[in-house]
Amino acid sequence: MEAINNREHLPVIKGEPDVNVRVLMKDLETKEEKVIIEDVPFISQVRWNNAGNIIAFGGGKRLSIYDTVKKDLVLEDELKNDSVTFFFWSPHDENKLYSEHPNLTNGSIYYVNLRKKVEAYETKEDLYFKGKLDNDFFYGTKWFVASEKDKKDSDSINTVIVDKMGNIVKVLNEGRFRDAYKKSLVQVGESGFGLYYVADINKPNNIKTLSKEFIFDVKFVAGGKIAYIVEKEDPENNLFILYIVDEKGREIKSLEVSGSSIALSPDGKTGYVGGPGWEKVNFETNEIDSKIPIENEDSEQEEIFRTLRGAMDTYYKFEVTGSKDWDKAKKYFIDTESPPQWAYFDLTTRYMEVSQANVKNDRKNLYRIFMELQDFKIDSEGKRASVSLHLLVNNDTGGGLSMDHALELIKKGGKWYVTGFSTFPFSSQREEVKNLVEKYVMDAQEGKIFSGILEGKEVEIGQIQFWRYSLPHLAPNIETANFCKVYLKVKSNGQEKIYKMVLDRQNQNYWKPTKLTDKELSSL
Protein backbone atom coordinates (compact mmCIF):
# COMPACT_ATOMS: atom_id res chain seq x y z
CA MET A 1 0.00 0.00 0.00
CA GLU A 2 1.40 3.39 -1.02
CA ALA A 3 0.08 6.85 -0.18
CA ILE A 4 -1.15 9.05 -3.02
CA ASN A 5 -0.82 12.81 -2.80
CA ASN A 6 -4.03 13.88 -4.47
CA ARG A 7 -4.25 17.66 -4.30
CA GLU A 8 -7.46 17.72 -6.31
CA HIS A 9 -9.49 16.49 -3.34
CA LEU A 10 -10.89 19.17 -1.06
CA PRO A 11 -9.89 18.31 2.50
CA VAL A 12 -11.87 16.69 5.25
CA ILE A 13 -11.92 19.36 7.95
CA LYS A 14 -13.19 17.16 10.78
CA GLY A 15 -13.43 13.38 11.02
CA GLU A 16 -11.72 10.52 9.22
CA PRO A 17 -8.87 12.02 7.14
CA ASP A 18 -9.08 11.62 3.39
CA VAL A 19 -5.90 9.58 2.83
CA ASN A 20 -5.90 7.81 -0.52
CA VAL A 21 -3.64 4.94 -1.51
CA ARG A 22 -2.78 2.50 -4.25
CA VAL A 23 -2.42 -1.23 -3.63
CA LEU A 24 0.41 -3.18 -5.26
CA MET A 25 0.88 -6.91 -5.80
CA LYS A 26 4.46 -8.17 -5.67
CA ASP A 27 5.78 -11.45 -7.04
CA LEU A 28 8.16 -12.70 -4.35
CA GLU A 29 10.19 -14.70 -6.88
CA THR A 30 10.54 -12.25 -9.74
CA LYS A 31 10.19 -9.14 -7.51
CA GLU A 32 7.88 -7.72 -10.16
CA GLU A 33 5.29 -5.24 -8.84
CA LYS A 34 1.90 -4.41 -10.30
CA VAL A 35 -0.68 -1.84 -9.20
CA ILE A 36 -4.00 -3.64 -8.73
CA ILE A 37 -6.07 -0.90 -7.04
CA GLU A 38 -5.65 2.82 -7.60
CA ASP A 39 -6.89 5.81 -5.59
CA VAL A 40 -8.90 4.18 -2.79
CA PRO A 41 -9.12 5.14 0.92
CA PHE A 42 -6.47 3.90 3.36
CA ILE A 43 -6.77 0.10 3.71
CA SER A 44 -7.39 -1.07 7.29
CA GLN A 45 -8.93 -4.51 6.65
CA VAL A 46 -7.51 -7.31 4.47
CA ARG A 47 -9.03 -10.79 4.21
CA TRP A 48 -8.53 -13.78 1.90
CA ASN A 49 -11.35 -16.16 1.04
CA ASN A 50 -11.02 -19.71 2.33
CA ALA A 51 -9.57 -20.95 -0.99
CA GLY A 52 -6.82 -18.31 -0.85
CA ASN A 53 -7.36 -17.06 -4.38
CA ILE A 54 -9.52 -13.95 -3.81
CA ILE A 55 -8.64 -11.09 -1.49
CA ALA A 56 -10.79 -8.28 -0.17
CA PHE A 57 -9.54 -4.88 0.96
CA GLY A 58 -11.54 -2.43 3.08
CA GLY A 59 -11.08 1.07 4.42
CA GLY A 60 -12.83 4.41 4.50
CA LYS A 61 -16.19 2.65 3.94
CA ARG A 62 -14.88 1.36 0.59
CA LEU A 63 -14.56 -2.34 -0.30
CA SER A 64 -12.44 -3.75 -3.13
CA ILE A 65 -12.26 -7.41 -4.19
CA TYR A 66 -9.39 -8.77 -6.29
CA ASP A 67 -9.29 -12.19 -8.01
CA THR A 68 -5.62 -13.26 -8.08
CA VAL A 69 -6.28 -16.01 -10.65
CA LYS A 70 -8.18 -13.89 -13.17
CA LYS A 71 -6.08 -10.87 -12.15
CA ASP A 72 -8.92 -8.39 -12.07
CA LEU A 73 -11.16 -6.48 -9.70
CA VAL A 74 -14.59 -7.95 -9.04
CA LEU A 75 -17.82 -5.93 -8.81
CA GLU A 76 -15.74 -2.77 -9.15
CA ASP A 77 -18.55 -0.50 -10.35
CA GLU A 78 -21.06 -1.75 -7.76
CA LEU A 79 -18.61 -1.39 -4.88
CA LYS A 80 -17.75 2.22 -5.75
CA ASN A 81 -21.21 3.26 -4.59
CA ASP A 82 -21.48 0.97 -1.55
CA SER A 83 -20.61 2.10 1.97
CA VAL A 84 -19.02 -0.94 3.67
CA THR A 85 -17.60 -0.65 7.18
CA PHE A 86 -16.82 -4.33 7.89
CA PHE A 87 -16.79 -7.65 6.01
CA PHE A 88 -15.97 -11.35 6.27
CA TRP A 89 -15.85 -14.30 3.87
CA SER A 90 -18.19 -17.27 4.20
CA PRO A 91 -16.27 -20.24 5.67
CA HIS A 92 -18.05 -22.77 3.43
CA ASP A 93 -18.46 -20.79 0.18
CA GLU A 94 -15.28 -19.32 -1.26
CA ASN A 95 -17.26 -16.95 -3.49
CA LYS A 96 -19.49 -15.41 -0.84
CA LEU A 97 -18.69 -12.32 1.22
CA TYR A 98 -20.81 -10.80 4.00
CA SER A 99 -20.72 -7.03 4.57
CA GLU A 100 -21.76 -4.46 7.14
CA HIS A 101 -22.98 -0.94 6.41
CA PRO A 102 -22.82 2.15 8.67
CA ASN A 103 -26.51 1.84 9.60
CA LEU A 104 -26.96 -1.88 8.99
CA THR A 105 -25.06 -4.53 10.93
CA ASN A 106 -26.03 -7.23 8.43
CA GLY A 107 -25.75 -5.56 5.04
CA SER A 108 -25.24 -6.70 1.46
CA ILE A 109 -23.95 -10.11 0.41
CA TYR A 110 -21.55 -10.35 -2.55
CA TYR A 111 -21.20 -13.42 -4.79
CA VAL A 112 -17.88 -13.19 -6.62
CA ASN A 113 -18.42 -15.98 -9.15
CA LEU A 114 -21.84 -14.63 -10.13
CA ARG A 115 -20.67 -10.99 -10.07
CA LYS A 116 -23.79 -10.30 -8.05
CA LYS A 117 -24.79 -8.24 -5.03
CA VAL A 118 -27.77 -9.22 -2.89
CA GLU A 119 -29.24 -6.56 -0.60
CA ALA A 120 -30.12 -7.41 2.99
CA TYR A 121 -33.84 -7.11 2.29
CA GLU A 122 -33.53 -9.54 -0.65
CA THR A 123 -32.13 -12.42 1.38
CA LYS A 124 -33.71 -14.55 4.10
CA GLU A 125 -30.35 -14.91 5.83
CA ASP A 126 -30.45 -13.37 9.30
CA LEU A 127 -27.01 -14.62 10.36
CA TYR A 128 -23.84 -13.12 8.86
CA PHE A 129 -20.34 -14.49 9.44
CA LYS A 130 -18.03 -11.86 10.97
CA GLY A 131 -14.90 -13.53 12.35
CA LYS A 132 -13.01 -16.73 13.10
CA LEU A 133 -12.71 -18.45 16.49
CA ASP A 134 -10.78 -21.55 15.33
CA ASN A 135 -10.86 -24.02 12.45
CA ASP A 136 -14.30 -25.28 13.39
CA PHE A 137 -16.14 -22.32 14.87
CA PHE A 138 -16.82 -18.75 13.82
CA TYR A 139 -18.33 -15.52 15.05
CA GLY A 140 -21.43 -14.07 13.48
CA THR A 141 -24.09 -11.47 14.03
CA LYS A 142 -27.72 -12.59 14.06
CA TRP A 143 -30.93 -10.64 14.00
CA PHE A 144 -33.20 -11.92 16.77
CA VAL A 145 -36.84 -10.95 16.72
CA ALA A 146 -38.40 -10.37 20.11
CA SER A 147 -40.07 -13.80 20.35
CA GLU A 148 -36.81 -15.66 19.66
CA LYS A 149 -34.74 -14.30 22.49
CA ASP A 150 -35.62 -14.48 26.18
CA LYS A 151 -39.14 -13.23 25.43
CA LYS A 152 -37.85 -9.68 25.19
CA ASP A 153 -40.17 -7.06 23.78
CA SER A 154 -37.71 -5.68 21.23
CA ASP A 155 -35.58 -7.04 18.40
CA SER A 156 -31.80 -7.16 18.77
CA ILE A 157 -28.61 -8.01 16.92
CA ASN A 158 -26.31 -10.26 18.90
CA THR A 159 -22.87 -11.67 18.33
CA VAL A 160 -23.09 -15.46 18.23
CA ILE A 161 -20.71 -18.42 17.93
CA VAL A 162 -21.56 -20.78 15.09
CA ASP A 163 -20.14 -23.77 13.29
CA LYS A 164 -19.13 -23.68 9.61
CA MET A 165 -22.70 -24.29 8.46
CA GLY A 166 -24.07 -21.46 10.60
CA ASN A 167 -25.61 -23.51 13.40
CA ILE A 168 -25.63 -21.42 16.58
CA VAL A 169 -23.53 -22.82 19.43
CA LYS A 170 -23.67 -19.86 21.83
CA VAL A 171 -25.44 -16.50 21.91
CA LEU A 172 -23.22 -13.71 23.22
CA ASN A 173 -23.93 -10.01 23.71
CA GLU A 174 -25.65 -7.31 21.69
CA GLY A 175 -23.40 -5.12 19.56
CA ARG A 176 -21.25 -5.23 16.46
CA PHE A 177 -18.40 -7.74 16.38
CA ARG A 178 -15.05 -6.12 15.61
CA ASP A 179 -12.21 -8.53 16.39
CA ALA A 180 -11.26 -11.67 18.31
CA TYR A 181 -8.11 -13.18 19.80
CA LYS A 182 -8.12 -16.71 21.23
CA LYS A 183 -11.18 -16.65 23.55
CA SER A 184 -11.42 -12.84 23.75
CA LEU A 185 -13.47 -10.48 21.63
CA VAL A 186 -14.26 -6.80 21.24
CA GLN A 187 -17.55 -5.25 20.14
CA VAL A 188 -18.76 -1.73 19.47
CA GLY A 189 -22.23 -0.34 20.09
CA GLU A 190 -24.80 -0.47 17.32
CA SER A 191 -24.31 3.24 16.56
CA GLY A 192 -20.51 2.97 16.75
CA PHE A 193 -20.28 4.52 20.23
CA GLY A 194 -18.87 2.38 23.03
CA LEU A 195 -16.18 -0.31 23.07
CA TYR A 196 -16.86 -3.53 24.99
CA TYR A 197 -14.31 -6.23 25.83
CA VAL A 198 -15.06 -9.83 26.77
CA ALA A 199 -11.87 -11.49 27.99
CA ASP A 200 -13.38 -14.98 27.93
CA ILE A 201 -16.31 -15.91 25.71
CA ASN A 202 -17.18 -18.67 28.16
CA LYS A 203 -18.03 -15.85 30.58
CA PRO A 204 -19.88 -13.51 28.20
CA ASN A 205 -21.53 -11.53 31.00
CA ASN A 206 -18.14 -10.35 32.27
CA ILE A 207 -18.02 -7.29 30.01
CA LYS A 208 -15.56 -4.46 30.46
CA THR A 209 -16.39 -1.09 28.92
CA LEU A 210 -13.17 0.32 27.48
CA SER A 211 -14.68 3.53 26.11
CA LYS A 212 -18.03 5.24 25.60
CA GLU A 213 -16.73 7.42 22.75
CA PHE A 214 -17.19 6.81 19.03
CA ILE A 215 -14.78 4.05 18.02
CA PHE A 216 -13.10 4.69 14.67
CA ASP A 217 -11.07 1.46 14.67
CA VAL A 218 -10.17 -1.35 17.07
CA LYS A 219 -7.93 -4.38 16.69
CA PHE A 220 -6.21 -7.01 18.78
CA VAL A 221 -2.45 -6.49 18.46
CA ALA A 222 0.74 -8.21 19.62
CA GLY A 223 0.20 -10.61 22.52
CA GLY A 224 -3.54 -10.06 22.86
CA LYS A 225 -3.38 -6.34 23.63
CA ILE A 226 -6.10 -4.12 22.21
CA ALA A 227 -5.52 -0.95 20.18
CA TYR A 228 -8.37 1.43 19.47
CA ILE A 229 -8.77 4.98 18.14
CA VAL A 230 -11.11 7.75 19.30
CA GLU A 231 -11.26 11.45 18.50
CA LYS A 232 -9.12 13.78 20.58
CA GLU A 233 -11.14 16.25 22.68
CA ASP A 234 -9.96 19.29 20.77
CA PRO A 235 -12.66 20.91 18.62
CA GLU A 236 -10.24 23.20 16.77
CA ASN A 237 -8.01 20.41 15.43
CA ASN A 238 -8.61 17.14 13.66
CA LEU A 239 -6.55 14.77 15.77
CA PHE A 240 -7.08 11.35 17.34
CA ILE A 241 -5.91 9.28 20.30
CA LEU A 242 -4.66 5.71 19.89
CA TYR A 243 -5.18 3.79 23.14
CA ILE A 244 -3.37 0.54 23.90
CA VAL A 245 -4.76 -1.66 26.69
CA ASP A 246 -3.60 -5.00 28.11
CA GLU A 247 -5.45 -8.32 28.21
CA LYS A 248 -7.22 -7.24 31.39
CA GLY A 249 -8.52 -4.08 29.74
CA ARG A 250 -6.13 -1.77 31.60
CA GLU A 251 -4.70 1.20 29.73
CA ILE A 252 -1.01 0.88 28.91
CA LYS A 253 -0.44 3.88 26.68
CA SER A 254 -2.20 6.66 24.80
CA LEU A 255 -0.64 8.19 21.70
CA GLU A 256 -1.73 11.25 19.71
CA VAL A 257 -2.06 10.34 16.03
CA SER A 258 -3.21 12.06 12.85
CA GLY A 259 -5.56 9.35 11.58
CA SER A 260 -8.50 7.19 12.55
CA SER A 261 -7.69 3.71 11.21
CA ILE A 262 -5.00 1.08 11.64
CA ALA A 263 -3.34 -1.12 9.03
CA LEU A 264 -1.92 -4.02 11.03
CA SER A 265 0.91 -6.36 10.06
CA PRO A 266 0.02 -10.09 10.02
CA ASP A 267 2.01 -10.74 13.21
CA GLY A 268 0.24 -7.89 14.99
CA LYS A 269 3.49 -6.22 16.01
CA THR A 270 3.43 -3.21 13.69
CA GLY A 271 0.67 -0.86 12.65
CA TYR A 272 0.35 2.14 10.37
CA VAL A 273 -2.18 4.88 11.10
CA GLY A 274 -4.23 6.19 8.19
CA GLY A 275 -3.65 9.91 8.52
CA PRO A 276 -1.41 12.59 7.01
CA GLY A 277 1.27 11.67 9.58
CA TRP A 278 1.23 8.00 8.48
CA GLU A 279 2.45 7.02 11.97
CA LYS A 280 4.28 3.69 12.28
CA VAL A 281 3.39 2.15 15.65
CA ASN A 282 5.42 -0.53 17.41
CA PHE A 283 2.89 -2.56 19.39
CA GLU A 284 5.64 -4.42 21.26
CA THR A 285 7.10 -1.24 22.76
CA ASN A 286 3.81 0.72 22.52
CA GLU A 287 5.56 3.65 20.89
CA ILE A 288 5.46 5.53 17.60
CA ASP A 289 8.58 4.54 15.69
CA SER A 290 8.21 7.10 12.91
CA LYS A 291 5.84 9.58 11.31
CA ILE A 292 5.71 11.99 8.42
CA PRO A 293 5.93 15.67 9.44
CA ILE A 294 2.66 17.46 8.71
CA GLU A 295 3.20 20.81 7.05
CA ASN A 296 0.41 23.34 6.69
CA GLU A 297 1.06 24.93 3.32
CA ASP A 298 -1.36 27.77 4.01
CA SER A 299 -1.43 28.85 7.64
CA GLU A 300 -4.23 31.36 6.95
CA GLN A 301 -6.42 28.61 5.54
CA GLU A 302 -5.68 26.43 8.55
CA GLU A 303 -6.71 29.28 10.89
CA ILE A 304 -10.02 29.47 9.02
CA PHE A 305 -10.44 25.70 9.37
CA ARG A 306 -9.78 25.92 13.11
CA THR A 307 -12.55 28.50 13.42
CA LEU A 308 -14.89 26.35 11.32
CA ARG A 309 -14.23 23.29 13.46
CA GLY A 310 -14.81 25.15 16.69
CA ALA A 311 -17.86 27.01 15.39
CA MET A 312 -19.68 23.99 13.99
CA ASP A 313 -18.85 21.92 17.07
CA THR A 314 -20.41 24.68 19.21
CA TYR A 315 -23.44 24.87 16.91
CA TYR A 316 -24.13 21.13 16.81
CA LYS A 317 -23.25 20.54 20.43
CA PHE A 318 -26.41 22.49 21.15
CA GLU A 319 -28.44 20.90 18.35
CA VAL A 320 -27.54 17.37 19.51
CA THR A 321 -27.22 17.66 23.28
CA GLY A 322 -28.89 20.95 24.18
CA SER A 323 -25.68 22.23 25.77
CA LYS A 324 -25.38 26.03 25.52
CA ASP A 325 -21.74 27.08 25.40
CA TRP A 326 -21.92 30.88 25.64
CA ASP A 327 -18.14 31.28 25.84
CA LYS A 328 -17.57 29.30 22.65
CA ALA A 329 -20.37 31.23 20.93
CA LYS A 330 -18.48 34.43 21.67
CA LYS A 331 -15.17 32.86 20.65
CA TYR A 332 -16.25 31.71 17.18
CA PHE A 333 -19.22 33.89 16.13
CA ILE A 334 -19.62 37.60 15.55
CA ASP A 335 -22.14 40.13 14.20
CA THR A 336 -20.91 42.57 11.56
CA GLU A 337 -22.27 45.28 9.29
CA SER A 338 -21.74 46.32 5.64
CA PRO A 339 -23.67 44.16 4.92
CA PRO A 340 -25.41 43.15 8.15
CA GLN A 341 -24.59 39.55 9.12
CA TRP A 342 -25.65 38.31 12.55
CA ALA A 343 -24.31 34.80 13.15
CA TYR A 344 -23.75 35.47 16.87
CA PHE A 345 -27.29 36.81 17.21
CA ASP A 346 -28.63 33.75 15.33
CA LEU A 347 -26.94 31.26 17.64
CA THR A 348 -27.52 33.00 20.97
CA THR A 349 -31.14 33.78 20.12
CA ARG A 350 -31.64 30.09 19.41
CA TYR A 351 -30.04 29.35 22.78
CA MET A 352 -32.66 31.52 24.45
CA GLU A 353 -35.68 30.47 22.39
CA VAL A 354 -35.29 26.70 22.38
CA SER A 355 -36.37 25.43 25.77
CA GLN A 356 -34.70 22.50 27.45
CA ALA A 357 -38.03 20.66 27.25
CA ASN A 358 -37.56 20.43 23.49
CA VAL A 359 -34.04 19.04 23.78
CA LYS A 360 -33.18 15.48 24.77
CA ASN A 361 -30.84 16.40 27.55
CA ASP A 362 -31.66 13.84 30.22
CA ARG A 363 -28.06 12.66 30.02
CA LYS A 364 -24.80 13.71 28.45
CA ASN A 365 -25.14 12.68 24.84
CA LEU A 366 -21.99 11.83 22.94
CA TYR A 367 -21.68 12.87 19.33
CA ARG A 368 -19.25 13.03 16.44
CA ILE A 369 -18.98 15.39 13.48
CA PHE A 370 -17.71 14.64 10.00
CA MET A 371 -17.08 17.89 8.14
CA GLU A 372 -16.03 18.02 4.50
CA LEU A 373 -15.09 21.14 2.54
CA GLN A 374 -17.11 21.64 -0.63
CA ASP A 375 -16.06 25.14 -1.65
CA PHE A 376 -13.64 27.72 -0.28
CA LYS A 377 -13.04 31.32 -1.36
CA ILE A 378 -11.04 34.05 0.30
CA ASP A 379 -11.02 37.65 -0.88
CA SER A 380 -7.96 39.41 -2.29
CA GLU A 381 -7.39 41.31 0.96
CA GLY A 382 -7.48 38.14 3.03
CA LYS A 383 -10.15 39.50 5.36
CA ARG A 384 -13.30 37.69 4.22
CA ALA A 385 -13.99 34.07 3.32
CA SER A 386 -16.97 32.16 1.93
CA VAL A 387 -17.15 28.45 2.70
CA SER A 388 -19.49 25.58 1.77
CA LEU A 389 -19.47 22.53 4.03
CA HIS A 390 -21.08 19.10 4.12
CA LEU A 391 -21.64 17.74 7.62
CA LEU A 392 -22.66 14.39 9.06
CA VAL A 393 -23.49 14.42 12.76
CA ASN A 394 -24.18 11.24 14.74
CA ASN A 395 -24.91 10.69 18.42
CA ASP A 396 -24.74 7.71 20.73
CA THR A 397 -28.49 7.17 20.66
CA GLY A 398 -28.41 6.35 16.96
CA GLY A 399 -29.64 9.72 15.75
CA GLY A 400 -28.01 11.43 12.80
CA LEU A 401 -28.09 14.56 10.67
CA SER A 402 -26.79 15.25 7.18
CA MET A 403 -26.53 18.96 6.40
CA ASP A 404 -24.95 21.35 3.91
CA HIS A 405 -23.96 24.79 5.16
CA ALA A 406 -22.87 28.03 3.52
CA LEU A 407 -20.88 30.21 5.91
CA GLU A 408 -19.34 33.65 5.75
CA LEU A 409 -16.25 34.42 7.79
CA ILE A 410 -14.47 37.67 8.62
CA LYS A 411 -11.06 38.42 10.09
CA LYS A 412 -11.14 40.90 12.93
CA GLY A 413 -8.37 41.72 15.38
CA GLY A 414 -6.19 39.07 13.77
CA LYS A 415 -8.75 36.31 14.40
CA TRP A 416 -11.32 34.62 12.15
CA TYR A 417 -15.02 34.47 13.09
CA VAL A 418 -18.17 33.06 11.50
CA THR A 419 -20.39 36.06 10.78
CA GLY A 420 -23.12 34.71 8.51
CA PHE A 421 -25.20 31.58 7.90
CA SER A 422 -26.62 31.42 4.34
CA THR A 423 -26.33 35.16 3.79
CA PHE A 424 -24.52 35.16 0.40
CA PRO A 425 -23.46 38.82 0.77
CA PHE A 426 -21.80 39.13 -2.63
CA SER A 427 -24.53 37.49 -4.68
CA SER A 428 -26.42 39.56 -7.26
CA GLN A 429 -29.60 37.74 -6.23
CA ARG A 430 -29.08 38.91 -2.66
CA GLU A 431 -28.92 42.49 -3.93
CA GLU A 432 -32.16 42.00 -5.86
CA VAL A 433 -33.85 40.69 -2.72
CA LYS A 434 -32.49 43.62 -0.72
CA ASN A 435 -34.13 46.03 -3.18
CA LEU A 436 -37.44 44.18 -2.75
CA VAL A 437 -37.08 44.23 1.03
CA GLU A 438 -36.58 47.99 0.98
CA LYS A 439 -39.83 48.35 -0.99
CA TYR A 440 -41.75 46.05 1.38
CA VAL A 441 -40.44 47.93 4.42
CA MET A 442 -41.68 51.20 2.93
CA ASP A 443 -45.07 49.57 2.28
CA ALA A 444 -45.16 48.35 5.88
CA GLN A 445 -44.26 51.80 7.22
CA GLU A 446 -47.14 53.24 5.20
CA GLY A 447 -49.51 50.64 6.66
CA LYS A 448 -50.10 48.89 3.32
CA ILE A 449 -49.04 45.42 4.54
CA PHE A 450 -48.81 43.48 7.81
CA SER A 451 -51.94 45.12 9.29
CA GLY A 452 -50.11 48.33 10.06
CA ILE A 453 -47.73 46.79 12.62
CA LEU A 454 -44.83 48.92 11.37
CA GLU A 455 -46.89 51.96 10.38
CA GLY A 456 -45.12 55.19 11.21
CA LYS A 457 -42.19 53.42 12.86
CA GLU A 458 -38.48 53.80 12.18
CA VAL A 459 -37.14 50.60 10.57
CA GLU A 460 -33.57 49.56 9.77
CA ILE A 461 -32.93 46.49 7.64
CA GLY A 462 -30.64 43.95 9.26
CA GLN A 463 -29.45 40.52 8.14
CA ILE A 464 -30.94 38.94 5.02
CA GLN A 465 -30.82 35.14 5.19
CA PHE A 466 -31.96 32.39 2.82
CA TRP A 467 -33.77 29.18 3.76
CA ARG A 468 -35.00 26.01 2.11
CA TYR A 469 -38.55 24.75 2.48
CA SER A 470 -37.77 21.05 2.89
CA LEU A 471 -36.93 20.96 6.62
CA PRO A 472 -36.97 24.02 6.87
CA HIS A 473 -33.23 24.53 6.91
CA LEU A 474 -30.73 27.20 6.04
CA ALA A 475 -30.14 27.12 2.27
CA PRO A 476 -26.74 25.76 1.17
CA ASN A 477 -26.94 27.97 -1.93
CA ILE A 478 -29.08 30.88 -2.96
CA GLU A 479 -30.45 29.19 -6.10
CA THR A 480 -32.35 26.54 -4.13
CA ALA A 481 -33.71 28.92 -1.48
CA ASN A 482 -37.51 28.97 -1.10
CA PHE A 483 -37.70 31.50 1.71
CA CYS A 484 -35.88 34.58 2.86
CA LYS A 485 -35.78 35.76 6.48
CA VAL A 486 -34.97 39.39 7.14
CA TYR A 487 -34.20 40.87 10.54
CA LEU A 488 -35.59 44.37 11.09
CA LYS A 489 -34.57 46.81 13.81
CA VAL A 490 -37.79 48.61 14.71
CA LYS A 491 -37.69 51.74 16.87
CA SER A 492 -40.78 52.98 18.65
CA ASN A 493 -41.19 55.22 21.73
CA GLY A 494 -37.43 55.25 22.27
CA GLN A 495 -37.19 51.47 22.35
CA GLU A 496 -35.72 49.10 19.78
CA LYS A 497 -37.13 45.66 19.01
CA ILE A 498 -36.02 43.02 16.50
CA TYR A 499 -38.62 41.65 14.10
CA LYS A 500 -38.35 39.02 11.42
CA MET A 501 -39.97 39.39 8.03
CA VAL A 502 -40.33 36.25 5.91
CA LEU A 503 -40.50 36.30 2.12
CA ASP A 504 -41.84 33.30 0.23
CA ARG A 505 -40.51 32.64 -3.27
CA GLN A 506 -43.74 31.90 -5.16
CA ASN A 507 -41.77 31.25 -8.34
CA GLN A 508 -38.22 31.75 -9.49
CA ASN A 509 -38.63 35.50 -9.95
CA TYR A 510 -41.10 36.64 -7.31
CA TRP A 511 -40.66 36.99 -3.57
CA LYS A 512 -43.83 37.67 -1.57
CA PRO A 513 -43.86 38.91 2.05
CA THR A 514 -45.87 36.44 4.16
CA LYS A 515 -44.95 36.97 7.82
CA LEU A 516 -43.90 39.67 10.25
CA THR A 517 -43.37 38.90 13.95
CA ASP A 518 -41.10 39.56 16.90
CA LYS A 519 -41.56 35.98 18.16
CA GLU A 520 -39.39 32.89 17.50
CA LEU A 521 -36.75 34.89 15.68
CA SER A 522 -34.26 32.00 15.36
CA SER A 523 -36.60 29.84 13.27
CA LEU A 524 -38.26 30.49 9.95
Image (cartoon, rainbow, N blue to C red):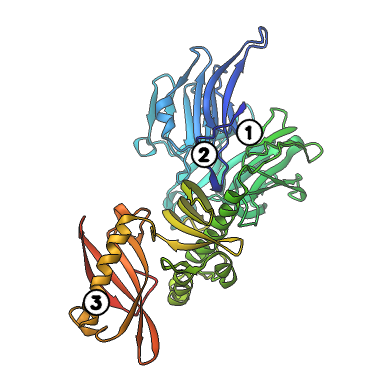
Mark 3 — residue? Answer: 442
Q: Position of residue 135 (x, y in %)?
A: 63, 26
The span from disc 2 to disc 1 (Cα, nearest Å) is 21 Å
**Sequence-wise, which precedes: disc 2 or disc 1?**
2
Residue 411 versus residue 419: which sits nearer the camera?
411
Q: Position of residue 180 (x, y in %)?
A: 65, 38
| Residue lying furthest front | 381
Q: Position of residue 254 (x, y in %)?
A: 74, 49
> On the picture, is 184 further left or further right than 223?
left
| Residue lying furthest top | 30
Q: Which element is circle 1 on?
A: loop
The span from disc 3 to disc 1 (Cα, nearest Å) is 77 Å
> On the picture, is 37 further left or further right than 28?
left
The amino acid at mark 3 is Met
Front label number (2 vs 3): 3
> On the picture, is 22 further left or further right than 354?
right
Quarter of the rendering occupied by the C terminus:
bottom left
Q: Quadrant of residue 497?
A: bottom left
Q: Residue at x 45, y 76 (%)?
A: 355
**Sequence-wise, which precedes: disc 3 or disc 1?**
1
Q: Position of residue 151 (x, y in %)?
A: 46, 55
Q: Which element is circle 2 on?
A: loop
Q: Residue at x 64, y 49 (%)?
A: 239
Residue 489 versus residue 398: which sits nearer the camera?
489
**Mark 2 burial class by Cα count in 10 Å: few <14, some 14-19, many 20+:** many
Q: How many marks?
A: 3
Quarter of the rendering occupied by the N terminus:
top right
The amino acid at mark 2 is Thr
**Sequence-wise, which precedes: disc 2 or disc 3?**
2
Front label number (2 vs 1): 2
Mark 1 — residue? Answer: 133
Mark 2 — residue? Answer: 85
